[in-house]
Image: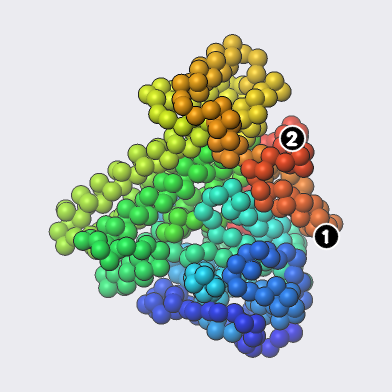
């Protein structure tokens, strides 16, 4: 085994700007080596885009880095401090099982966080063991890469290693570490943490750092912190609309799981909805449906209001003026989100121009889908290819009338039928990571050490709008015995 804190040279190109922030924001870490790491998955295209050498990553030295057994050249391991509202309640959190190695500066001069998840205890671990088990890390790999391929901003998965050690959950499970990448791990919860325990100077430093890192053009703004607030609102409005459009349910939209960059983060209890129902919840701990599919836009607004509160001291010296500015910005979220959602739904139906009745047309379809327990993804796919015969939505008068209205609507735009079809093809995925297919892949991997099922799944998920023949078998619905599906946090 590698000695503690031995430096491994692999030609990484790290900077550590986060480590130059006020000390309250992080804790530097010693490594927690694991016994016998083995590389299970490596995201070669992501690695290449980061400027990393695949052969080196696969070598023993590369694997030691992914295992947290050695520090790559230039890295400065740290755990980030943050707070957050969990199910509405404020809590102190922080990376309890994650380690930021540093920021890889890519050949395109992008700054990307490289973080190990499951890399051992940190000062923020509370009672936890700092570890992760293989199934959930593979699940995050599948889900985050599927989201990326769907065109949804997200953190990504670079590698999974097994540790050769067990973790104790309800049973003994194989341990694993996921290496994930993100344009940063700044969260609403990071601002909440500084707002609660830092000085105004700390808050300003954090806000300036965030602007510099994520939001170009702020230099010309008369109030850069109001600009920051509005930009974060814009990105979240678009992100959550994109989730809704593919039936994604995040599952745990606590403020510590909402990024400032507008990327999806925290793939613990997420899942894709099959049967359309806005009340759909998969997470075992979401008893009241706070984070149900249809509630996500509202919760997004609630979280953004918490973000706005943290910025008040920076917005204006006069408190009332600051509150007014924040309120106006947060109020704008609803419309921004709705516009993205509407534009996306219209694209899903092949509609290019605008008509007053479009929203009613969309709402009526969703209503028929809900009544007939239609599958969300397959319904739009069937409409795209005009093959609705085999879908649950087919058969009722209500649907027949809707279909006629929709066809008439399409005929009232300049664009051809073919153009509509193309728009629908690229807006309606052929496949999503269906829960039963994800479970099947994880079962094969974790129970039998057979990673081929997951490889095949990742392969078809990597081009969800291809509508290829090999994707066909992945469109089938789960057996009734696979429902109701449940997901879990703290895995
Ligand atoms: P999450 O549900 O993944 O957002 O995690 C909520 C908080 O619990 C974060 O601060 C995590 O770092 C922490 N956490 C989750 N699992 C563990 C674990 N096994 N050991 C230590 N901390 C953990
Ligand atoms: Mg989290």
Residue 99, image quadrant: bottom right
- Label 2: which residue? 476
Name above or below for residue 27 compared with residue 160. below
Label 2 near ligand 1 (CB < 8 Å): no
Label 1 near ligand 1 (CB < 8 Å): no
Q: Find residue 190 and report its horizontal and vertical position in percent.
A: 41, 64
In this view, the residue in front, 53 or 373, is 53
Can residue 53 be seen here? The reply is yes
Q: Which quadrant: the N terminus?
A: bottom right
Q: Residue at x 53, y 64 (%)?
A: 182
Q: Secondary structure at mark 1?
A: loop
Name the quarter showing ligand 1. bottom right
Q: Residue at x 45, y 55 (%)?
A: 262
- Label 1: which residue? 449
Name above or below for residue 440 compared with residue 33. above
Quick one: label 2, few (<14), some, or many (20+) residues within 10 Å?
few
Q: CA distance from mark 1 to mark 2?
A: 25 Å
Q: Secondary structure at mark 2?
A: loop
Q: Residue at x 44, y 77 (%)?
A: 17
């Amino acid at each position: 085994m590698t000695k503690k804190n031995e430096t491994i040279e692999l030609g990484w190109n790290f900077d550590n700007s986060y480590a130059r922030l006020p000390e309250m924001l992080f804790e530097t870490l010693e490594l927690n080596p694991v016994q016998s790491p083995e590389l299970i998955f490596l995201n070669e295209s992501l690695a290449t885009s980061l400027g990393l050498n695949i052969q080196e990553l696969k070598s023993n030295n590369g694997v030691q880095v992914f295992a947290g057994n050695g520090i790559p050249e230039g890295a400065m391991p740290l755990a980030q401090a943050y707070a957050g509202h969990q199910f509405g309640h404020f809590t102190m959190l922080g990376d309890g099982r994650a380690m930021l190695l540093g920021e890889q500066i890519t050949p395109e001069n992008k700054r990307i966080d490289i973080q190990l998840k499951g890399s051992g205890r940190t000062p923020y671990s509370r009672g936890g063991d700092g570890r992760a088990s293989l199934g959930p890390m593979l699940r995050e790999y599948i889900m985050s890469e599927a989201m990326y391929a769907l065109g949804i901003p997200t953190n990504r998965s670079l590698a999974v290693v097994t540790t050769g050690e067990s973790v104790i959950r309800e049973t003994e499970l194989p341990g694993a570490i996921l290496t994930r990448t993100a344009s940063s791990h700044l969260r609403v919860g990071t601002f909440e943490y500084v707002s609660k325990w830092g000085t105004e100077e700390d808050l300003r430093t954090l806000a300036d750092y965030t602007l510099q890192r994520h939001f170009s053009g702020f230099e010309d703004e008369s109030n850069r912190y109001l600009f920051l607030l509005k930009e974060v609102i814009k990105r979240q409005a678009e992100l959550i609309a994109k989730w809704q459009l593919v039936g994604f349910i995040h599952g745990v939209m606590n403020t510590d799981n909402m990024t400032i960059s507008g990327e999806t983060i925290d793939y613990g209890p997420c899942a894709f909805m099959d049967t359309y129902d806005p009340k759909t919840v998969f997470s075992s701990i979401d008893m009241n449906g706070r984070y149900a599919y249809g509630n996500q836009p509202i919760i997004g607004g609630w979280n953004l209001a918490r973000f706005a509160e943290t910025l008040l001291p920076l917005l204006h010296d006069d408190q009332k003026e600051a509150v007014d500015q924040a309120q106006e910005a947060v109020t704008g979220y609803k419309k921004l989100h709705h516009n993205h959602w509407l534009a996306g739904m219209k694209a899903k139906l092949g509609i290019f121009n605008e008509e007053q009745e479009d929203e009613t047309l969309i709402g009526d379809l969703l209503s028929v889908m809900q009544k007939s327990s239609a599958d969300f993804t397959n319904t739009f796919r069937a409409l795209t290819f005009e093959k609705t015969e085999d879908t649950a939505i087919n058969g009722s008068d209500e649907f027949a009338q809707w279909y006629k209205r929709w066809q008439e609507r399409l005929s009232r735009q300049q664009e051809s039928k073919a153009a509509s079809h193309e728009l629908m093809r690229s807006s309606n995925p052929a496949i999503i990571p269906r829960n039963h297919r994800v479970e099947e892949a994880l079962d094969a991997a974790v129970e039998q050490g057979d990673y081929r099922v997951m490889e095949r799944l990742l392969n078809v998920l990597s081009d969800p709008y291809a509508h290829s023949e090999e994707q066909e078998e992945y469109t089938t619905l789960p057996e009734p015995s696979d429902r109701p599906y449940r997901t879990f946090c703290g895995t």
